[in-house]
Image (cartoon, helix red, strand yellow):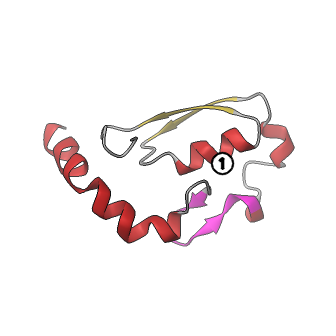
């Protein structure tokens, strides 16, 4: 919604400042539990991601997409907040 987009655009920098250490710059973290995909392997072996097209919806700052790209996937990150994706 417009209100949600506005809130995230206004608060994106603060959110990343507050949670960036937990989320990392290019980690794939599952939920507030902090389960790291590199260790958990919930998507399967990292090598199996190479060449896959991946759509990340609600990407925030796209940390998961950066991790997927590092594994050779071709991610597209979408988020309603333009500021989160900058």
- Write the residue at 46% across / 65% down: 20
- Total numbered circles: 1
Give the SS element for disc 1. helix
Q: 39 or 61, which lies in front? A: 61
Position of the C terminus, as image quadrant, is top left
Nearest to the observer: residue 47 or residue 25: 25
Residue 33 position within the rendered picture, expressed as x and y whole percent measured from the top left: 54, 72
- For residue 50, side relative to residue 30 (left or right): right
63 vs 69: above or below: below
Q: Quadrant of residue 11?
A: bottom left
- For this view, does 39 lie left or right of residue 33? right
Which of the pair 2/12 is nearer the observer?
A: 12
Q: Decide: few, some or many residues near mark 1? Use Cα within 10 Å; few <14, some 14-19, many ≥20.
A: some
Which residue sits at x=76%, y=36%? Answer: 72
The answer to which image quadrant residue 65 occupies is top right
- 51 vs 45: above or below: above
Residue wearing tag 1: 67
Give residue 41's position: percent from left, percent from top: 77, 57
33 in magenta: yes
Is 62 placed above or below 23 here? Answer: above
Residue 15 location, x and y as percent? 33, 62
In this image, 13 relative to 54: left or right?
A: left
**Residue lying furthest left in this view?**
3
The segment highlighted magenta reads: 29-38
Q: Quadrant of residue 13?
A: bottom left
Residue 46 on image: x %, y %? 81, 47
Locate the N terminus by quadrant: top left
Depicted 35 relative to depicted 11: above or below: below
């Amino acid at each position: 919604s417009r209100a949600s987009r506005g809130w995230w655009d206004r608060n994106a920098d603060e959110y990343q400042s507050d949670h960036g250490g937990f989320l990392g710059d290019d980690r794939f973290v599952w939920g507030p539990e902090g389960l790291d995909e590199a260790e958990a392997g919930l998507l399967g072996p990292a090598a199996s991601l190479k060449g896959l097209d991946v759509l990340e919806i609600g990407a925030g700052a796209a940390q998961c997409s950066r991790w997927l790209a590092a594994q050779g996937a071709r991610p597209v990150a979408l988020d309603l907040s333009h500021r989160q994706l900058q």
